[in-house]
């Protein structure tokens, strides 16, 4: 097909990246998530392509591949920005607890809703379908919270990253339950995590010690290739591979903590710092490109007509309402009063789509409408957009009030200073005149 010629694909891909960069600029000014704009771009492209090609090719494999690479890059990007300190132990544990309780609570209620309203859906299948709908999207959250205070931004990075990792672990734990002969139970699950952490630490130390000795300048993509290899092998071994990526990112970002005391002699600090800095840039850029194409292709695959199904709307609204109700209760318990805009920053996205395509055939339910997935993703993103815009306006109002107070205070100070100058000037004049009056001329 002429439309899919090499040069057309290059032109199209280049324009998508340029538009994505422009969307990021709009997002920073308006707080509308760039991901939402990318999905809309994908929908527009879908209808434009259908004009030339009535039967579009299947993008499922491309979507899955981009989703996996995007997930790895996003988690690595988040891990590289996390600084481990004693003072941050409580925020980290609090974020982890909120992510875990939010995940389990949302999945449980969503599973009940799906089991009750979707015909022929067993509770076991309902849990599998509900889990992807209960995972926060770090792909949407991390780029969107840069305008928040450092404390809130850090909370969202921790929470969304933990939600991704624990959600994937929970999903594959549920898949294990589909085949009782292979199901190792909670003890086997805990052993799996412990084994993954052990492998991750050994691999992280080995990579750092080896790569600091490589003299070649072009070694960052080699490092990324090694991490992708470890992730894929870990998946083949049924390990929680995302933990490997997270731990490596934490180790290289906090290398002094992981090489304490005399073990520092094994490090070449300048080289490690250079590797970290270059890896951070490449990860950021790669995550941006992969995320761009993932959400555009997702937009191309969307079936908009499914959004107008009454069952889809009703079930989706119930699931969305349960998400925010559970989140409200958890945030109130752990954080207290200051829960805005955190309450509404709970979008679903890349992980939701990725795990939805990973549901085994034996657990798939033909009566489940994929529109529910789409509705929840779009609605939670729009709610987050509204909350972020409202928060930005509130911040601007507060800043205006502060500026006004400062202006009034400065004006008052200026008036006082002028009064003091006038009074001092008049006192000096009085003193001068009195001095002149007391001096009498001496005549001979």
Image: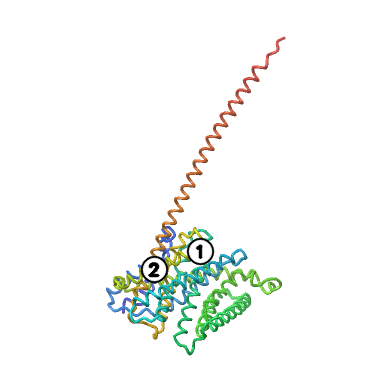
Residue carrying label 1: 333
Residue 127 percent coordinates (x, y):
42, 78
Quarter placement of the C terminus? top right
Where is residue 186 drawn, in percent x and y? 53, 82
**Structural distance between the alpha carbons of marks 2 and 1:** 20 Å
Q: Which residue is mark 2?
A: 320
Which of the two discs, 2 and 1, labels the residue nearer the N terminus?
Answer: 2
- Residue 15 can be seen, yes or no: no
Above or below for 207 versus 324: below
**Residue 62, position in %: x, y?**
40, 78
Left/right of residue 335 with respect to residue 376 in the rendered view? right
Tell me the SS state at disc 2. helix
The N terminus - image quarter: bottom left
Q: Position of residue 201 (x, y in %)?
A: 60, 77
Can you tell which quarter of the image residue 115 is in? bottom left
Q: Which of the numbered marks, if any, corresponds to residue 342? A: none
**Label 1 secondary element:** helix
- Asked if 165 appears above or below 404 in the picture, the reply is below
Which quadrant of the structure image shows residue 417? top right
Q: Nearer the viewer, residue 419 or 89?
A: 89
């Amino acid at each position: 097909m002429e439309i899919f010629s090499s040069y057309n694909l290059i032109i199209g891909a280049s324009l998508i990246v340029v538009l994505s960069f422009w969307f990021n600029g709009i997002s920073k000014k308006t707080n509308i998530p760039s991901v939402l704009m990318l999905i809309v771009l994908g929908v527009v492209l879908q209808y434009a392509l259908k004009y030339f090609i009535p039967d579009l090719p299947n993008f499922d494999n491309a979507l899955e591949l981009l989703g996996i690479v995007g997930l790895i890059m996003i988690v690595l990007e988040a891990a590289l920005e996390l600084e481990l300190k004693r003072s941050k132990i409580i925020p980290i544990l609090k974020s982890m607890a909120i992510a875990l309780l939010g995940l389990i609570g949302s999945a449980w209620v969503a599973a009940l809703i799906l089991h009750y309203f979707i015909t022929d859906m067993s509770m076991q299948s309902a849990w599998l379908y509900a889990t992807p709908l209960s995972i926060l999207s770090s792909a949407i959250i991390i780029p969107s919270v840069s305008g928040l205070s450092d404390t809130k931004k850090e909370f969202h990075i921790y929470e969304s990253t933990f939600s991704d990792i624990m959600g994937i672990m929970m999903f594959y734990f549920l898949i294990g339950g589909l085949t009782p002969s292979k199901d190792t139970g909670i003890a086997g699950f805990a052993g799996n995590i412990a084994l993954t952490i052990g492998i991750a630490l050994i691999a992280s130390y080995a990579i750092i010690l080896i790569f600091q000795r490589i003299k070649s300048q072009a070694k960052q993509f080699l490092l990324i290739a090694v991490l992708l290899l470890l992730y894929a092998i870990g998946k083949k071994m049924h390990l929680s591979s995302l933990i490997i990526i997270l731990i490596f990112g934490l180790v290289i970002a906090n290398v002094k903590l992981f090489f304490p005391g005399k073990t520092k002699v094994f490090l070449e600090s300048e080289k490690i710092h250079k590797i970290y800095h270059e890896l951070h840039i490449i990860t950021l850029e790669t995550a941006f490109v992969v995320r761009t194409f993932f959400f555009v292709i997702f937009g191309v695959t969307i079936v908009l007509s499914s959004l107008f199904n009454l069952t889809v709307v009703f079930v989706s609204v119930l699931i969305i309402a349960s998400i925010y109700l559970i989140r409200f209760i958890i945030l109130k318990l752990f954080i207290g009063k200051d829960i805005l805009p955190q309450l509404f920053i709970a979008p679903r996205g890349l992980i939701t789509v990725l795990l939805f395509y990973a549901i085994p055939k034996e657990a798939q339910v033909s009566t489940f409408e994929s529109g529910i997935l789409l509705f929840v993703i779009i609605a939670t993103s729009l709610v987050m957009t509204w909350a972020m815009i409202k928060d930005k306006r509130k911040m601007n109002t507060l800043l205006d009030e502060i500026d006004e107070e400062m202006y009034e205070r400065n004006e008052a100070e200026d008036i006082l200073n002028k009064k003091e100058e006038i009074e001092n000037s008049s006192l000096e004049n009085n003193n001068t005149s009195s001095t002149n009056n007391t001096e009498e001329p001496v005549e001979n």
